Image (cartoon, rainbow, N blue to C red):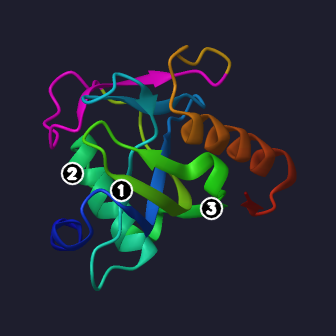
Amino acid sequence: MGRLRKLVGHDLIISPGAQVLAVGDDGRVLLQRRTDSGVWEIPAGASEPGDSFRSTAARDFAEEVGIPVAEDSLIPFASLSSAQLHTLHYPNGDVVQAFALCFFVRLDLLDLSGLSTDGEATEARWFALDELPEVMHAPSKKVLQLYGNYLETTMFQAY
């Protein structure tokens, strides 16, 4: 992505990526607070050359949260590609329309206080789906809604 940004500057880039919703055994979900904006979001990241959606998801989750997950433990439940919702404007001026495959992974509830991350997040915490933080990233809110729909229908969700 860095090489591409050198060529196009802050102009719009269309980028494939993945999001990973970690779900604890009690149904709580893991969210992280972004360093640059302070909003809470689902861990996510952009694909790199040679990546699959699964490898992107596993790599970025481990980098951002500090917890490795096996690619085969990731369960796809939705895609998020709406330009209106998933065009991201970063504080540095970069603009990305992200196309994300959304996965969930079951994790034991962990104490997250000692985790080491890549610096994109200041903290990570478990939240009940009916007690989410007020300041949330809009695409993450939508993915949580899609996850709820998936749980009700067991059908893959696309938005």
Of marks 3 and 2, the one in the foreground: 3
User: CA separation, marks 2 and 1?
Assistant: 10 Å
Q: Give the alpha-carbon distance from disc 3 to disc 2, as whole Å.
A: 23 Å
Q: Which mark is residue 78?
A: none
Magenta stretch encompasses residue 119? yes
Contact check, label 2 and label 1, Cβ < 8 Å: yes
Is any part of residue 29 visible from this angle? yes
Identify the image quadrant of residue 3: bottom left
Tell me the kind of residue under disc 1. Answer: Gly
Among all residues in the image, which is located at the extreme bottom? 50
Residue 45's disc number: 1
| N-term mark: 1 or 3 | 1
Q: CA distance from mark 1 to mark 3?
A: 14 Å
Q: Which residues are magenta?
A: 111-129
Q: Nearer the viewer, mark 2 or mark 1?
A: 1
Q: Amino acid at mark 3?
A: Ser
Q: Which residue is mark 2?
A: 63
| Residue 63 is covered by the magenta coloring | no
Amino acid tagged 2: Glu
Instruction: Find numbered disc 3 in the image and state the secondary structure of the residue it sits on.
Output: loop
Residue 81, numbered label: 3
Look at discs 1 and 3 and give the one toward the viewer: 3
Residue 98 spot, x, y in % from top left: 49, 60
What is the x, y in percent for residue 84? 65, 50
Taking the spot 69% from the left edge, 45% from the top edge, the residue there is 147
Nearer the observer, 85 or 154: 85
Look at the magenta stretch and give its main secondary structure: loop
Callout 2: 10 Å neighbours few (<14), some, many (20+)? some
N-term-proximal mark, 2 vs 1? 1
